Image (cartoon, helix red, strand yellow):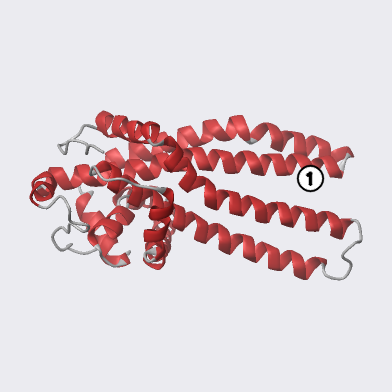
Amino acid sequence: MTAFDLRPLTLGEILDRTFTLYRRNFLLFVGISAIPQTLVLALNVISLLLANKRAAGVLPGVGIVLGVVIAVVVIVVTILAYFLSQGATILAVKDLYLGRTASIRESFRRTRGELWPIIGVGMLSGTAIIIGMILLVFPGIFIACRLFVSVPVLLTESRGPRDSMSRSWDLTQGAAGRAFVIFLLYLVILFAFALLLVSPFSALAVFAGIRNPEMMRFWTFMADLGNRVSSTLVSPFLLIASSVFYFDLRVRKEAFDLQFMMDPESERITGPSSSGLPSIL
């Protein structure tokens, strides 16, 4: 496996490397993304089947309680699956980008020990972004762009959640615009896939619900299936891009290419201490 040449990249080159990594390792990234999405889909199918049985009177007296329990389980599993897939994808990108081998099993195995810090970053970042959105939207977008590489920092430099966010804030100084373009392209791709794979089934579910509740449930399931397929195919793009962007920032600001040349086998190549987050975080 040959590493990519480590040098400062233009935005176009960052996107090109993102698509190149995804195309060359399509089964790897789709496999990582599909495993948790399939688990969530299976839980949704179980929920749908139980809803049908409750509607038919097969499970009387337990409808509300069972529905609440299933809803909670689906939410928890969805959150854990998302963060697990996020970490596994970024670790796989790091290995491939630096010329190492990567596999689905090994990426998930290594992510297990980092799962709670990844969740910590997600919760803290999400809280900061929500606060920023409340402050007339733009601050939330800006914060999201400045915290864009928090998880790659966490998984590459062995930092804690808040320190990883501070480090991302430092690295993306002067580069928030490029992060915004990557976010925007991701949203465009996601919208296109949703329009193709989700919207038709959602529309059919609405029309079918007027006359045939059974068909409404079927088309609702198909819409959920389309949503899972869309997420499986599109989510790796943003995660790969965040990792490539992180390495580019390291090369530009800290001569990471020279550090890697001196110690290419190092699992953790740390950078300087971060200067801290603004008070909102």
Q: Is residue 197 visible?
A: yes
Tell me the residue at 66%/44% (across/down).
Answer: 224
For label 1, the crowd category at 10 Å Cα-Cα, with few meaning under 14, some 14 to 19 and many 20 or more, is: some
Residue 159 location, x and y as percent?
25, 65
Residue 5 location, x and y as percent?
17, 35
Tell me the residue at 49%/54% (across/down).
Answer: 82
Q: Is residue 174 visible?
A: no
Residue 230 location, x and y as percent?
55, 38
Up/down of 132 relative to 204, above or below: below
Secondary structure at badge 1 equals helix
Q: Quarter holding the N terminus?
A: top left
User: Could you say which is closer to the camera, residue 165 or residue 137?
Assistant: 165
Q: Quadrant of residue 182?
A: top left
Q: Quadrant of residue 275?
A: bottom left
Residue at the extreme right:
57
Amino acid type of the residue that numbered disc 1 sits on in the rendered structure: Arg
Tell me the residue at 13%/48% (across/down).
Answer: 260
Up/down of 19 relative to 50, above or below: above
In this figure, which residue is indicated by the disc labeled 1? 217
Tell me the residue at 88%/40% (across/down).
Answer: 212
Residue 273 location, x and y as percent?
15, 63
Q: How many marks?
A: 1
Q: Quarter holding the C terminus?
A: bottom left
